[in-house]
Image (cartoon, helix red, strand yellow):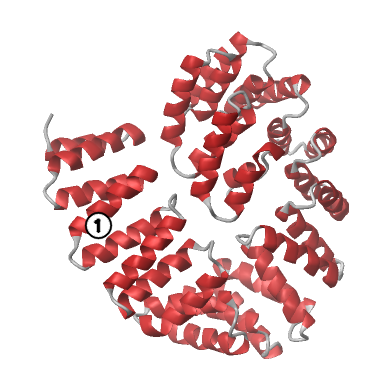
Amino acid sequence: MTLLLALLLSASASTDEVVSLLRQGQDAAALSASRQAVVATPGDVEAHELLIDLLVHLGLAYQAENAYRSFKKDNDTAMGWYLFGRSALQAEDAREAYTLSLAKDETYARGWMGLASIDRAQGGLSRSEERYRKALELDPGLSEAWAGLAGLLMQQKRYDEALEVTRRATEAVPKDPEGWLAGAALDEDNARSWLEEGVKNIPDEPRLLHAVATARIHDNELALAQQALAKAVEIDPGLQQARADLAVLKEIEAKRFDLAGHGMLARARQLSSEAPVAALDTFDLLVKSYPDCYLVWLGRGHLYAEQDLSVEAEADLKKALALSPKSSDVQGALGMMLLNEGSAKEALPLLAGASVARPEDVQLGVSVGLAKANVEGVNAGVTHLAQVAERHPNDTAPVMALVSVLVQAGRPDAAYTVLDRALERYPHPTLLLAFAAAAKDLGKNDKAAETLRELAFITGDAHYDAMADELSPR
């Protein structure tokens, strides 16, 4: 999970619906709900903050800046200028906006927090600390300012002070999971206490549940750990590591694995990128010691695939599938490998099974569509990819896959139409560039140039303006 998404998921209770939709992978619905919240409660600064952060997360930062440039014209207030500063793409624009926010109201805590964040980003650590402390003096409920101050102190290796700030943060904002997670990281000897207390305060926070489960595994309290992991995965199916840890505990429960093997598997996975030879040695020992545990075969299969040893990878993944035929992780891994090797017919049922189990996984959905196009024909693939794009309208992957299938099938007009409609819902730079290319291929040079100039405005890249001038001089 990205840091930005983690911040989004730490939002206040008033944004619970948006957070729930994000965890389900329903970005479009989350964005719609966030916009509705802003319209319904225009004075709720947290609703505005969430909308800005969500737009940035979805690659629409320029939309956020344009929206809040207009917003502050009608709201010449401390809040209006602060929100424009938060949405600004350039640091100096943000600094000016935060300064004007404080000119409107020097007691506006978020204005001080905004300036502190700019100072920190630009290396002004002493001034940043002063401003974070000023913000918290004015509003102790600013969880983002607590996190910023603690992070600043950690950056300077002032760990004892950071721990004290974190302790105060959990007292001031007990419903913010970041404080409990930070406390566990800073106070390792008492990490479990921090996490258990965090779960008491926020019983439905999946990251805390996952962290406390890890601590329980360390203390050999496997049944309690499994309960916490099951709840975390139910709340947020996208927590891949939590899902993997839950699978480990189920294998241990079935007597096919044990905690020593779990430790070895974790080390092997860590070594995979740093020292693949050592990782392979560890995996060889794992499959010898735990031949009935599908996880070790899956892990070694992944390692072989990363090293382009496709024959060995396929053999291990098929062994994992024989041991656990219903595992969506195994089905997905083997299905994608077979699809990449051109065995779409063999891949399709595996990918379809994995996608049913993990509907939030866009990559799986796209892979099913590509396999269908190969096995059942272009129309079947296009239909499926269109459904995936409909479920995930704020993801470029299904649209780009759909366009690729249509272009390869000799249907450039249909590809152009798909991009045109997608841009109505999600004007992402990636789609804009693809649309410009599609327009050019169809001889619509003026439309291609118009789109390239829009890209130049959004990205600040003059190269797109030059490309536009070549197609349609001004």
Q: Position of residue 245 (x, y in %)?
A: 70, 69
Question: Which residue lies at the image location 44% right of the left edge and 21% below the top edge?
Answer: 70
Quarter that holds the C terminus: top left
| Label 1 neighbour load within 10 Å: few <14, some 14-19, many 20+ | many
**Residue pointed to by mark 1:** 415
In the image: residue 307, left or right of residue 279:
left
Nearer to me, 71 or 251: 71
Q: Secondary structure at mark 1?
A: helix
Vertical arrangement, residue 445 with respect to residue 329, above or below: above
Question: Which residue lies at the image location 46% right of the left edge and 15% below the top edge?
Answer: 73
Q: Can you see residue 277?
A: no
Q: Quadrant of residue 470?
A: top left
Q: Quadrant of residue 163?
A: top right
Tell me which amino acid carries mark 1. Answer: Ala
Question: Which residue lies at the image location 39% right of the left edge and 77% below the top edge?
Answer: 339
In the image: residue 377, left or right of residue 294:
left
Q: Position of residue 248 (x, y in %)?
A: 71, 75
